[in-house]
Every structure is written in C-alpha cells, then in structure tokens.
Amino acid sequence: MQAERREPRRALRRPHSEVKIVSFDVFDTVLTRRVGNPRAAFLLVGRRAAASGLINCSANAFAKVRHAAEVRAFQNAGGLDSSVSLADIYREVAHGAHLCEADEARLVELEMQVETELLAPIEVGVERVRSARRAGKRVIFVSDMYLSSAFIEEQLRRFDIFETGDQLFVSNELQLSKATGRIWTPVLSAIGAYPSQVHHIGNDGVSDGRMASRAGLSTEVVSSYNLNRYEQSLETHHSETDGLSSAIAGASRLARLAPFTSAEQVLADVAAGVVAPFVLGNLLWTLDVAKREGLTRLFFVARDGQLLHDIAQRLAPKVGYEGELIYTYGSRQAWALASITDSHTLAVESIISVGDDLTVSLRDTLARLEVEPEAIADSLSLNGFPATTWEQPLDAANATKLRQVVLSDDFIFQHLLHQAKLSRERILSYLDSVGAITSEPIGFVDLGTGATLFNALSSILETVGQRPPRGFYFGLRSSIPDSGFGRPLTYVRSEDDRLGYLRTPGLLTMVELACTADHGSVIGYEDVDGTTKPIFAADGNDAVVDWGLPIVRKTVCRVAQELVTDSTLVGVSSVDLRPAVLDVFSLFWNSPTREEAAVWGGYPFEDGWGEQSVRHPIAERRTIRDVVHSAPHRHWWNEGSARLSGPVTRTAFQVRSSARHNAKRFRAKLRQR
C-alpha cells in the first residue's frame, strides 16, 4: 500500500549566509555505473536473468519491459513526487509478464546484485567530497532514486564516501524529488539549515541546477560527469553489441574522470572515447580467436604492439585466455633482410621502396640490406650505378632499377643472401630467447596493412622448419601477394576480398600514433654477454613521450581495467564492435574540437626507416594559399588543420573536400557502367 504523502514544511530562508553544508547528488556525481546510459543496465540484468532461467524472453525485450514498467509505476503513483521503489517497479514487470511473487522477488534481488557489481566511484567526484570535509563543511547526499537509502548508503560506505555524521535523503522515501524541487523543503528542515547555507553539487542541469537554485541553494552543475559525445555514440550501439559498447562507454567515463590538467584532459578524452574502443575491440577479437584455435602464445610486435600487450595482459584473465602474452622487439628494418632467401625475395621490394616518402641515397638504401656499395662496386658500376651516384638521391626510376639489379645480378644477390643469413642467425637467436621457436601453435599481432612483418617472420621461421604463425592484422590493403604462408586475419578490412570496412580515412594514422611505444625503433640485434638484445635507433621515444603518450596509455589501460567483461552481463565473444568504433572515430576525425585538433594535431608523427626517419605534425593552421596544394604528407589530418585555420580557409577546405568526394563518386559510377 502506498505510504501517505507527507506535506513538506516551509523551509527557512535567510539570504547571504555562509555555506556550511555541501550537498552531493549520488548517481553520476560520486558514484556511477560501469555502463553508459543507466537504462543499459537493464539489458545486463536481462542477460543474467535469461542465463539463470528467470525470464523466457531476450535480454533486449526484458530491458524494454523493465524501462516501460518504471515509467508506468511513476505514472500510476502520481508522478515523480511519489514513493516508487524498485519493488513497485517489478510489481509492474510481474503484472505484465504474469510472474509469480517468488520470481518477482528474485528479479528485484538480481537487479540489486547487478547494481552492486556495476557501481564504481567517480574519482574527481569523491575528491570533491573529501575537499568539502577538509574545508570543515558538513556533507549530505540527496538522490532521486527508486533504490532504498539503506542500499545507497551501503554502496557509499563500500567506497569510503559516506562517513558517520553524514546524512542521506532519497526521493522515493520522502515522496518528493529534486526534479520538481520539492525535496529541498524537508531536507533543509531535517538538517536545520537555511537554503543559502547549502551548496549543492550534481550532474543534472535541471534537478541539480535550476530546481535547487530556485529553492535558494547555491549550485554547481558538473556536466562533464555526464556522457560525452563519444560515449553517447557508443551507447547507441548497446543493443547490437549485447551491452559491450555501453560497458566501454561507462569504462571510458570512469577513465577520463581522473584528475587531469586541461591539456591532459584533451588527451584523456580522446584516448578513452576513441582509442580505447578500437584497442579493446581488436584485442577481444584477437583473444577470442586465439582461445578458439588453441594458440599457446601471442607475440605483440614492436612498436605498435606495446600498448596492445599492456591491454591484453588486463583483458586475457577476464575473457579466459590462458596463453602467454609476449612483447617482441622487431620492425620492418630489423626483419626484412633476414627474410630474404633463394625462394623468398619479396622483402626486397619493401626495403627498396619506389613510393618512399623520404628521398634517400643509394648508399642509405643499401644500408638497409646491410650492404656497403664498396663491396659490390664493380657490379653496381656495370649496371649503371658508378660511385659518383651513390650519394645522390635515389628517385623512383632508379629505385626500380636498383631493385632489378639486386635480384638479377648474381654477384650482388649472393652477397645479399650472405648478409641475410648473418642477420637471420641473430634474429633466430632472439626469437628463440622469447619462445617463438616452438612446435606449438602461436599467434603474431601487428597493426599494419601490408603483411610485411608477417611474411618476414614466416620466412625466417621456415628456415628452421617451423610453420607460419596465425597473423592478426589491422587490415590488408589491395594487391598483397600470398608468399606461401597464408594470409593474416584482419580486423577492419581485407581489400582484395572486398570484406570489412574498405573506406576508413585516417583510422590507420590514428591507430599508429596512439599505439606506439616509449622506446626507439628497432634497427637490429646484437650479442650482449651471450644474450641477443635489440638495437634501437634511439634510446627512447622522447618526442612522443613529451607530447603525452603516458597519459594516453594510462587512460586506455584504465578503460580496460574498468571494463565489465562478465559474459553473463555483456557480450564479449563474437560481438562486432567495429560499427561503434568507426562511429566514434568519425566523430573525432571529421569534426574535432579546436582543442582536440591542436593537441592531437601536434603529435610528432615518425615516418621512414630507423635513423633515416623524420617527424612532423599531422595537422597545423593553414592559409587560403594552401587550399590549392596537396597535403604535406600521407598522414596529414585535413579536418584537424581546417579546425585550426581561419573561417575563410576552413570553408575553402570544406568546398575542396566536397568537390573531391563528388568527383570520386562520379568516377566510381562511370566504372560501374
């Protein structure tokens, strides 16, 4: 029977009193659920209820029924200023689903259990509570909620937020809500304070802001505690991802709401909302396949693999993958030469690159093959490369010619095979030291699109009679030949097969810059006291570390740490996160804020081979003159540059981009005819 509504007493008012009491909203202010929208929790409750046999419908159907029952319960009780409890809501659920009282009670208990598992403290919100205490203020909590004050207080105490002497007021027990503003009259009476003596902090602009202010309280609305645009986008995919995208949204919010400076916050927001979804989606797919195929070890190759390895170590125990996770020092420069054999020469094309962004000399190019031109001087001269040309820039035509010479001139090729054998011996020693020389099935994780490292490693392992590893790649671009080792699995796309998401401009650039390492690129190996160690082009990756890599890595790791992976609550196996990942990436890449464009556009992107590489930003302010010119380099972020530029230049870039897009569509239609 509904309790009789209490008539509130008139609150005492006295202007200009000193604030003595700080009032805090509870949910999404000091505590939050590890999901995006609170309604997404109903989907998780439904998954567990279905798994336990409590319901016969789908989790999605249950979530809709549960939400509708809540709305109906408040309508039937007379509105928000009523005593609707969780039990009342499930009376509505049971009435529509024809459940017995025992099952109704079990569902109430189940939802409270899921609430307990999902709740987590908001770090910056809890710090506000502690700051108020340090300032000598009295602390109270006021919540619009159908859960009981006993349950809410238990959760606050669980995270050391509620202390003896604090007070908690809950709308369903007072039969009055913050949303209407009527709750403040009995609250002020209970604490014996004038409205002007209370400062209220919450996340809702209406309930915690406008209505509390109308009651005479000073207020502070912390809207940053709500879902940001990336988390809202993830939340829209919660149904088709079995709640996983919502769980990532919730974990993202918790990760970015750690104490950061303003510059760090821009890094953290994008790391949590854009980078983390891709990394988590990629790794959940990788670990799922590795578990199903019985791979005993997964090798994450430098430098893209460092962050992936860190996150995999956090995810593997959660999803039940029990194999070893090994970070492996390698690179195209370190492995390509060693992969060249009588039967495998494809690596020569990647080493002597015709389409290189950097203009290098013949001497620099041969150095990648560990060949000095003096050692093959006569053959070079006979083939049109006299000593006078060795220091000159190697243009595309001469690069193509050098390729042919290296492969067709027997003396040069035999010299190359000798150098490859020496390099291979060092690499095999290193691979053996990390456990990659084995008869067991293993996996190899990279974020490339050319399968260069996969083919190089497979060729190297073939020389000792070992079968190729299972490859896990970002994608495969078109015209990648099968070198006899099979093709890696791809997460985003396989262009030759026309599978996946074939058009994702900028995504690979974003992934490469976010998933880098804090050490320099690997350029080879050396023996140190009987142990083979990697040689780096530089001791550290100082430019990227100074830019903010530690904040990005810390934030993505925190998202992984907070992510709910209990399969009775969310889908973690065979869930396609790519639509959600691509949506949040598109939001960032195509419409960055000015702050995002400035911070992320200033990333010192590294291009080239080892010591010959150069660094450049991916976005800078442009002028109207630049509109007619092509992008400065292949990783250029046009939308970021446009955001940093003036309005006239920005409009000109948008017109140019639209024209190019329409031209591509027109050419595509012509090809279809």
Image (cartoon, rainbow, N blue to C red):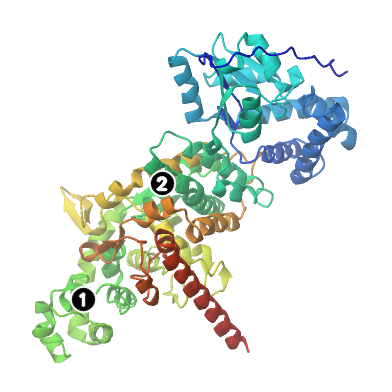
In the picture of the structure, the residue carrying the numbered disc 2 is: 267
Q: Please name whichever residue, 18 or 148, is drawn nearer the observer in this view of the structure.
A: 18
Residue 531 image position (x, y, % from top left)? 21, 49
Residue visible at 37% across and 51% down? 599
Tally the marks.
Answer: 2
- Amino acid type assigned to the residue bearing label 2 in the image: Leu
* Residue 554 in the image: above or below residue 208: below
Residue 166, quarter of the rendered image: top right
Crowding at mark 1 (Cα within 10 Å: few <14, some 14-19, many 20+): many
Residue 57: horizontal and vertical position, in percent? 81, 43
Residue 525, quarter of the rendered image:
bottom left
**Rounded to the nearest whole Å, what is the CA distance between mark 1 and mark 2?**
45 Å
Left or right placement of residue 336 versus residue 373 in this view: right
Secondary structure beneath label 2: helix
Residue closest to the eye, 32 or 238: 32
Any part of residue 300 in sight: no
Query: Which quadrant, please, contains the N terminus?
Result: top right
Q: Label 1, on which residue? A: 416
Indicate left or right for 298 with 377 as reference.
Answer: right
Rate crowding at label 2 as few (under 14), some (14 to 19) or many (20 or more) other CA atoms within 10 Å. Answer: many
Where in the figure is residue 276, as x and y percent of width and height? Answer: 48, 48
Q: Which of the marked residues, 1 or 2, is nearer the chain's N terminus?
A: 2
